[in-house]
């Protein structure tokens, strides 16, 4: 029996060894840096290679690192390469495209071919794969959409793109454009020209008025979708053209219950209830007839008092600011016109060479004074809210425009659109920093600006976002063309602690970026 058992045991051992020898080790699939496999085969294998967008070389390739999904969304020297859901405004596609019938074609074509390394452009199938991926939100290998997490608390900056009917959404953590909101899709037509912008105090809503539309859009800041609109076209009075009323600047009530919006062309102020997005007729003002007439022209900047029943309105041409008070019980409106240069107030219908031409009004955080930019005389006038007297007149740079405050540092920032800037080659414009206690100029910020119009203070992270319109035909050419307009504007990030530009990046946007507002400013 023993002699029979031994050969059987040996036979089973031999079979086991034979079977094990036929088992191949599992193949390890490339991770492709957390990209979906089809995308990783393009970006990692064809773009993140030696001499291009890999870890060793990317600093010489516009600072854009493409070896992983996470690195892609850090952007490059000129900002975001991919904007989720936005195939028309993702610059990566411009450089991968060789067919102008499909969209913008930028040079040099990527992948970039050199004498040492011959590379072919992407095939049509590869290009279409990238387009489809971005259209779905540019997810990672696990389906996660960039910047989609923490929607209730994510810090953002919103910027109107006046030349493109867009609102850009910047993620404060990465400083990259995370979304574009197409406001032409809402009522009002495709050429609405978004002007000012405001975020509610609770950070849950964003409001956009339009220069060439009868509507004011409401955006949910958690989803960045348009969720409502107010029709302000023909709702107050019977005089003037409210349809293209030049709806410009929005002032939001401290409790977020209502808005006051200036109509530059129709000479109106309209009050909107935010919950319903309906016009509050009794608190709105028609400059020509109706509810009731107001003897002014071209209202632009608007600021409010603590109880949101008194408004200070910059009348663009002349020397006047209007103070309008609304009786909360009777809704009766009373007016006072204030000269910001010590002369009798006068509102005119056009610019001249000697008037202050008030542009914007900024209320101090304590509501005890307000500031007025005078673009005609290059001054900021400080007014006392108690008696509307002039506290001080401060000289600033050429053509001052918008203002914003940083309460923690007690600083007021003033954009000077046409101020000389010799610190940066080819730059134009500056930001004046005024101490709101001493009313003295504390500093002048010179950065890589060109016609900076508006700013947003991210007080939580300690940065100032400066929006360069680059509107002049003589302004700098863009790094790349855009899907809209002749050339790009951009934003620059300034360190609030040092008043210096944070880095060398010029975060390019689309054509004519204009106004900015921050969500959760601190």
Image (spheres, rainbow, N blue to C red):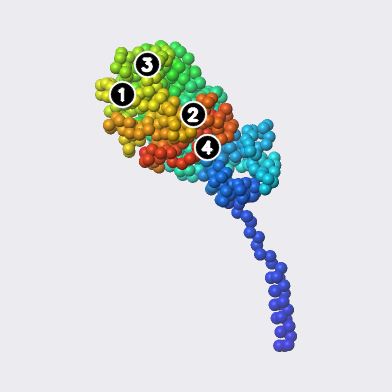
Figure quadrant of residue 387: top left
Q: Quadrant of the C terminus?
A: top left
Report the residue at 28% width, 22% height from top: 390
Report the residue at 54% width, 46% height from top: 59
Q: Which residue is mark 2?
A: 469
- 424 and 505: which one is in front? 424
Q: Which residue is mark 1?
A: 393
**What distance separates the C-alpha of mark 2 from that of mark 1?**
27 Å
Q: Secondary structure at mark 2?
A: loop
**What distance separates the C-alpha of mark 4 from that of mark 3?**
41 Å
Q: Which residue is mark 4?
A: 179
**What distance separates the C-alpha of mark 2 from that of mark 4?**
19 Å
Q: Secondary structure at mark 4?
A: strand
Question: Upstream in the sequence, badge 3 or badge 2?
Answer: 3
Residue 355 disc label: 3
- 247 and 501: which one is in front? 501
The mark lying in front, picked from 4 and 1, is 1
**What distance separates the C-alpha of mark 4 from that of mark 1?**
40 Å
């Amino acid at each position: 029996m023993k002699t029979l058992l031994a050969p059987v045991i040996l036979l089973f051992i031999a079979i086991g060894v034979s079977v094990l020898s036929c088992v191949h080790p599992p193949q390890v699939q490339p991770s492709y840096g957390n990209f979906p496999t089809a995308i990783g085969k393009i970006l990692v294998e064809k773009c993140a290679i030696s001499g291009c967008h890999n870890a060793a070389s990317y600093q010489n390739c516009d600072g854009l690192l493409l070896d992983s999904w996470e690195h892609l969304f850090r952007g490059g020297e000129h900002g975001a390469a991919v904007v989720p859901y936005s195939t028309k405004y993702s610059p990566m596609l411009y450089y991968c495209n060789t067919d102008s019938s499909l969209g913008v074609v930028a040079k040099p074509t990527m992948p970039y071919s050199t004498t040492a390394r011959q590379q072919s452009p992407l095939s049509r199938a590869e290009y279409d794969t990238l387009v489809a991926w971005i259209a779905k939100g540019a997810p990672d290998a696990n389906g996660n959409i960039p910047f989609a997490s923490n929607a209730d608390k994510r810090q953002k900056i919103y910027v109107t793109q006046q030349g493109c009917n867009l609102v850009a959404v910047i993620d404060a953590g990465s400083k990259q454009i995370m979304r574009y909101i197409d406001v032409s899709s809402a009522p009002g037509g495709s050429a609405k020209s978004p002007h000012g912008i405001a975020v509610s105090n609770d950070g849950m809503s964003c409001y956009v008025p339009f220069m060439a539309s009868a509507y004011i859009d409401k955006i949910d800041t958690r989803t960045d979708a348009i969720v409502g609109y107010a029709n302000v076209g023909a709702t107050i009075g019977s005089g003037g053209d409210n349809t293209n009323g030049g709806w410009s600047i929005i002032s939001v009530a401290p409790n977020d219950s209502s808005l006051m919006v200036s109509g530059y062309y129709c000479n109106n102020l309209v009050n909107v209830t935010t919950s319903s997005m309906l016009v509050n007729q009794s608190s709105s003002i028609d400059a020509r007839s109706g509810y009731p007439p107001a003897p002014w022209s071209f209202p632009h900047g608007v600021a409010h008092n603590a109880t949101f029943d008194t408004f200070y309105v910059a009348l663009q041409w002349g020397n006047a600011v209007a103070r309008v008070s609304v009786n909360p019980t009777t809704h009766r409106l009373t007016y006072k016109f204030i000269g910001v240069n010590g002369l009798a107030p006068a509102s005119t219908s056009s610019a001249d060479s000697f008037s202050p031409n008030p542009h914007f009004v900024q209320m101090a955080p304590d509501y005890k004074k307000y500031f007025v930019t005078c673009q005609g005389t290059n001054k900021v006038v400080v007014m006392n809210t108690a008696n509307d007297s002039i506290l001080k007149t401060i000289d600033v740079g050429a053509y001052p425009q918008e203002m914003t405050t940083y309460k923690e540092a007690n600083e007021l920032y003033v954009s000077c659109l046409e101020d000389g800037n010799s610190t940066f080659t080819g730059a134009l414009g500056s930001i004046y920093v005024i101490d709101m206690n001493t009313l003295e100029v504390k500093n002048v910020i010179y950065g890589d600006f060109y016609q900076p119009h508006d700013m947003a203070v991210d007080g939580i992270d300690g940065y100032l976002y400066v929006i360069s319109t680059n509107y002049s035909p003589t302004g700098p050419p863009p790094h790349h063309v855009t899907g809209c307009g002749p050339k790009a504007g951009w934003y620059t990030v300034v360190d609030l602690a040092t008043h210096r530009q944070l880095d060398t990046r010029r975060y390019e946007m689309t054509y004519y970026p204009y106004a900015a507002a921050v969500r959760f400013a601190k």
